[in-house]
Image (cartoon, helix red, strand yellow):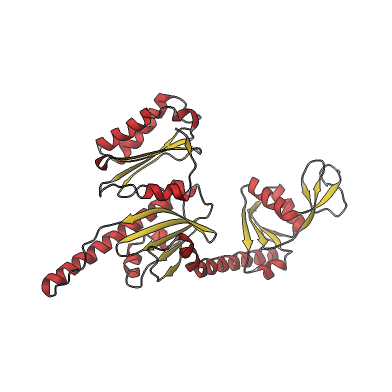
Amino acid sequence: MAVTAVSPAVLERLSRIESAGHPVLSVYFDLDPSRFPTPPAREAELSALLSSAGAHDLDAQHVRDAVDTHAELAQGAGAVAIFSCAAAGALEVLALAEPVEPLVVLDTVPWLEPLAAMLTTGDWGVAVLSRRGARLFRGDRDGLIEFAAVRDELHRRHAQGGWSQANLQRGIEQQVAEHVRHTTEVLLRAHRRRPFDQLAIVASDELWPVVQDSLHRDLRDRLAGVLERDLEHAPAQEIERALTPVFERAERDRERALISRLDEALGTGGPAAAGLDEVLATLEEERVEALLLAEGAVLTAGLCSGCGRLSASDEGRCRFDGAPLHPVDAVEHIIALAARRSVEVVLVRHERDALGEHGQLAALLRW
């Protein structure tokens, strides 16, 4: 079996697995040879996963048969994702290039969030809810990837009046509340696997109070905005555009908080650095917690022809080995240096002028 290139189209196809209302068992099976080097080790991993899910015997056997049928996967893949609904005769097996965290989920929808996380580095969570359905996304203003489509069947509104209508309506509202609770539980599961930086909810003004009551505290703490719109069937690009004000407000608030922290630290001799020379030095010392870079900044520095290091030295020679320096735009090199040290880079869009007072580049330090 060839390794699958994960894409939005693959996620959309998997989200439409026909389960006829039966639970879907989603299994992410790690094939990393450093962790599971032998068939017995992989068998033990799979057995532990299936036992933890409380999966129906038929689904568990479905998954085992799939692994046995595709035994060659261990030779070429980093992981396997299996989606099984034996009661409906549905089975999907994907060979993945990248290792994944071993995981098993039994739910009414296939669990696609680990695949969505492979397609985006953005960590906003977005939930688009209606009375009958919900769509969940991970990403940011540059792109949202849908990882779950929750469809809960509700009784249609009854046209008759009287007590029977009132009772039916109460029953419908209870089902709507259960649907919202289910959706927020799926959202919380995604957050606990890989935390959202911030969360946006799209729901009607009628539905929002129900959503608010169902949100776990961990999700409420990340809530950045609520959009009262009907976007249940909108493409992801339209949802991104509609949420632009929410994204921008959150960005602006965060930038202001970071600049305020920077100003205070620089004013008191605290853990911060500003300007190319100081920031480069603290990056080399691995002291940087977050790098603040003005959008569109142009920073000139010298790249050493010997050791390849970046230097802000005006002397024309590297401060490390004395080799000649060649002028370069320093921004790309600084971002790459930060990435190698796992340092967060914050591209400052809204508070560029405030950061410009510190040379368009600054760093918040660990110590």
In the image, is residue 352 above or below residue 17? below
Q: Position of residue 164 (x, y in %)?
A: 12, 70
Q: Is residue 193 visible?
A: no
- In the picture, measured across the screen, residue 334 lies left or right of residue 103, that is right
Q: Position of residue 89 (x, y in %)?
A: 27, 40
Query: Quick one: which residue is furthest to the left in this view?
Result: 163
In the image, is residue 189 above or below residue 211? above
Q: Quadrant of residue 48?
A: top left
Q: Is residue 273 visible?
A: yes
What residue is drawn where x is 69% and y is 70%?
A: 353
- In the picture, measured across the screen, residue 249 lies left or right of residue 70, that is right
What residue is drawn where x is 82% and y is 41%?
A: 306
Q: Count the marks: how many?
A: 0
What residue is drawn where x is 54% and y is 52%?
A: 121
- In the picture, measured across the screen, residue 156 lies left or right of residue 36, that is left
Q: Quadrant of residue 357?
A: bottom right
In the image, is residue 140 above or below residue 225? above
Q: Front-most of 329 and 223?
A: 329
In which quadrant will I find the N terminus? Answer: top left
Q: Position of residue 114 (x, y in %)?
A: 44, 46
Q: Quadrant of residue 292?
A: bottom right
In the image, is residue 18 above or below residue 187? above
Q: Position of residue 291 (x, y in %)?
A: 65, 56
